[in-house]
Amino acid sequence: MAFVNRRSELADLETWWARTHPRPAMVWGRRRVGKTALLQRFASDKRSIFHLGTGRPERGEVAQLSRKVHQIAPSRVRNLAESPFQSWEEALEYLDAAAREAPLLLVFDEFPEMMSKSPELPGILRAFVDTTGPESGLRILLCGSAMRTMEAIQEYRAPLYGRFDLSMQLHPFRPHEAAEMLPALNPADRALAYGLLGGMPLYLSWWDAGESVRENISRLACRPTAPMLVEGDYLLATEARHGDQLADVLRAIAEGRTKHQEISDAIGADPSRTLRELQRLRLIERLMPVTETEKSRRRIYQITDNFLAFYLRVLGRYRSEIDRGLGDTVLNAVTHGIDDHMGPVWETAFRDHLRRYAAQIHAETVAVGPWWREGRDEIDAVVLAGRSRTPVMVGEAKWARKVDARRLLPRLVQKSAALGVEAEALRFAICARETVTGAGEGTLTVTAADIFTQDTGQERLSR
């Protein structure tokens, strides 16, 4: 899988590396988000030792580290492969001495797995960091996927609290970043692939630009051992370890139960704690009309991970048939469900695009989000500006190849009247997959070519 993007993250890591005597760094994020690939690229021109924690007993972990040290920084008087370190303290002391000759990067990947059998390790690292002199060239970087543990390591009263010079949470690619994973596709097909697979680099690498959409869906989703099914099962099983309700809440939201009470009725319990956990994991988001405050009762929940939404919302309907070997016969039904799935995904990508270029829309943009009145009007995107949070732009996004702005604008103007701002004070935006026609002067038109591109977007946004 090719490494793309992550330029700002690499720059932050290089800044940390260049410090005279940096304290440890931390990189953390969900599984499959590309942490190890990022660190391997960062370390490609550096003397480095990667140690992957696997939950072995301490003696086994230290012995495995000894073998890697033997390859990169061998001892002149001791064969570390045959006579390994006996403790973490001994290993750190040796590496500190080895790094005085030239800077050395030590990466503890899946650090929570190491802590599971060596719970004293954070305290050992704290003592090492606090007593190491400025002449040391050892740079220690901790990496992990267990979100709760990686957060807890940084909390007050934790041994390593206040001892990180860099803490970086890695997130899935945004639409314009995902485009770099799909260079052989046209923009509309990039949008579709992103809508089905989300922003995880590994998932995006599954898409074959040489196959049709139907062929990709058949290969990725319509066999019992298809990657999307296997990975979806793994994701739910992994995250469900955090609480029995997690998978149930996700399924309820995927089935259209988006309000707190609806979710509670579906699972037969109070989902508040699980909803907060899912938001922290960035698997769901809480939406409310952008003009309202956090205290608003008009809140709904939406799955933010496109891959997970498609797995639950579309593939979940046909999972039993696929497992019985009927993948070929349900393929039509699965592909026909894509357009319904893409509607909210496309609206979210549209809002992300507006946030990306918020400064060009209005110098004082403070929020971009959806707006609705209960059971009535809905606007896909409203841009607010200034301390008064005044609406300055409203937009509509349609997952259609071509839309006529002359048909959409009158209704959009009508709905925007409820915002309490004169239409003359607003700018309007229309978004379609490939083409927007009939847009008057001043109307912003957005297509997949704008959203899924590496261009600056200035010229397109000025339309």
Image (tube, grey):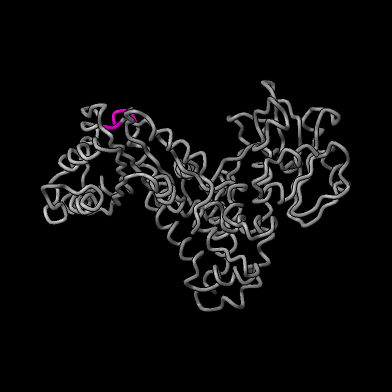
Of the 4 image quadrants, the one containing the C terminus is top right
What is the number of callouts on the image?
0
Most foreground residue, 365 or 138? 138
> Does residue 430 lie above or below 333 as drawn?
above
Provide residue 252's location: percent of width, then percent of height.
54, 53
- Taking 259 as reference, is 159 left or right? left
Q: Residue at x 69, y 60 (%)?
A: 339
Residue 391 occupies quadrant: top right
Most foreground residue, 169 or 327? 169
**Image: magenta residue range:** 155-160
Provide residue 447's location: percent of width, then percent of height.
74, 49
Q: Is residue 91 magenta?
A: no
Provide residue 225's location: percent of width, then percent of height.
47, 71
Q: Residue at x 24, y 35 (%)?
A: 100
Most foreground residue, 261 or 427? 427
- The residue furthest top is 387
> Does residue 27 lie above or below 192 as drawn?
above
Residue 159 occupies quadrant: top left
